[in-house]
Amino acid sequence: MRDLGQIIKAYDVRAVYPDQLDEWLAANIGAAFVQVVDAHGGAVVVGHDMRPSSVPLVEAFTAGVIAQGADVVQVGLVSTDALSFASGLLDLPGAMFTASHNPAKYNGIKLCRAGAVPVGQDTGLGAIRRLVEDGVPAYDGAAGQVSRRDLLPEYAAYLKVLVDLAGIRPLTVVVDAGNGMGGHTTPVVLTGLPLTVVPMYFELDGTFPNHEANPIDPANLRDLQAKVRETGADLGLAFDGDADRCFVVDERGAIVSPSTITALIAARELARNPGSPVIHNLITSRSVAEVIREHGGTPVRTRVGHSFIKAVMAETGAVFGGEHSGHFYFRDFWRADSGMLAALHVLAALGEAPAGSTLSALLQEFDRYVASGEVNSTVDDAAARSELVRTAFSPTAYAAVDAGEPTEVDDLDGLTVDAADWWFNLRSSNTEPLLRLNVEATDAATMERVRDAVLDLVRTPREEVA
């Protein structure tokens, strides 16, 4: 038996095809999924991305599902948020075959319960793993049936109900789909709008011949930045491989922080839903919470990760949630994340502004601090290094960095240290021997001093620490 702990992860199934994730395993996960979500006699909606391995994996998963007496509604090529739409609209559990931004050799499965409720390690994935390891019991009833349905037109129409763009002024937008699912969904969603769309890498190609479909890496945005400047476009949009994340480039070709987009969308959603809670994870900019309060909302801070965001959204009734990784969650979209819905909000905000307005000017009020971006360090002992930083930056034993003393330390997710003019968060990776550092300050010099002071502690040779 292969090590399923390396394949069935905290939030999804993700592994190399076919060495780790193959048709046999997909079929068994399908059968186990039916048991875990109690879909016998019901149905499961299944979609997939453009990777060459997705179709055979879908067929194997489908075979496992119908063998357990559940029907399968195949929706074909879709983005992950379109699969969430299908799960919400049809009120069915769902499976999306994608490895998101991972390289071509990977594939995976994102699972949800009816209504797009995510399935994570503690809410079903652990049980699925145990069933597969022990052998999924056979079902003694009739096999399910397979049907096919195209929901993309309904998905597009629903998004445009949530964000009205009918009255916006004409805009030119460059869209880099990275040969991923954004190239399939963008033409359907943006058709009929007063937009001139300049497409980049819309051809579906799971080998990613132009660049990785991972817009959080600035190297993968260079083509988009150059095309925006070359064409004089009003803005640029970049989607990851399964198009559930969106990154934005302004008219100058400058990359817009996802925290800034979070603040912008929060202000827009609070205009429609006054007084609502809005979720943000703990590495978003301080400006996000400030904007939420200024627009009459209640900021709610969470750990990093979609399962935490969605759970807290359900508990609080929050209208919106944003993460610094480019994930944006919407109450009216079954609390699922949608890169396309976030993109529509940005287009609407700029399109509603007076003629001649630029995106960079529009976003100035939401972009208030200087951030380091995520800085990763390979470490031998993440816990020991984090404790070293905690000791140095504790209010009672502060190692000064000429940037103001810390005022608060918390452990919501890793180590977060706050001061009047700066803060940082230091978190361990769930999958690699890494510590991830994010720093923000009121000015570049302060940010750099704090960043360098933390990195000096994290990266000091082991013999010097002992």
Image (cartoon, rainbow, N blue to C red):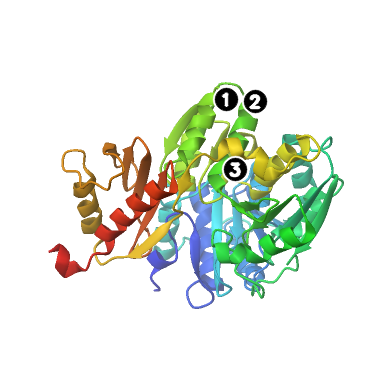
- Residue wearing tag 1: 295
- Residue 180 can be seen in this image: no
As shown in the figure, which amino acid type bears the numbered disc 3?
Ile
Could you tell which of marks 3 and 1 lies nearer the N-terminus? 3
As shown in the figure, which amino acid type bears the numbered disc 1?
His
Q: Quadrant of the N terminus?
A: bottom left
Relative image position of residue 334 (x, y in whole percent): 61, 38
Q: Is residue 255 above or below residue 313?
A: below
As shown in the figure, which amino acid type bears the numbered disc 2?
Ala
Relative image position of residue 316 (x, y in whole percent): 48, 28
Relative image position of residue 156 (x, y in whole percent): 77, 46
- Residue 423 can be seen in this image: yes
Which circle marks residue 271 in the picture? 2
Q: CA distance from mark 3 to mark 1?
A: 15 Å
Which circle marks residue 78 in the picture? none
Crowding near pointer 2: few (<14 within 10 Å), some, many (20+)? some
- Residue wearing tag 3: 261
Q: Secondary structure at mark 1?
A: loop
Q: CA distance from mark 1 to mark 2?
A: 8 Å
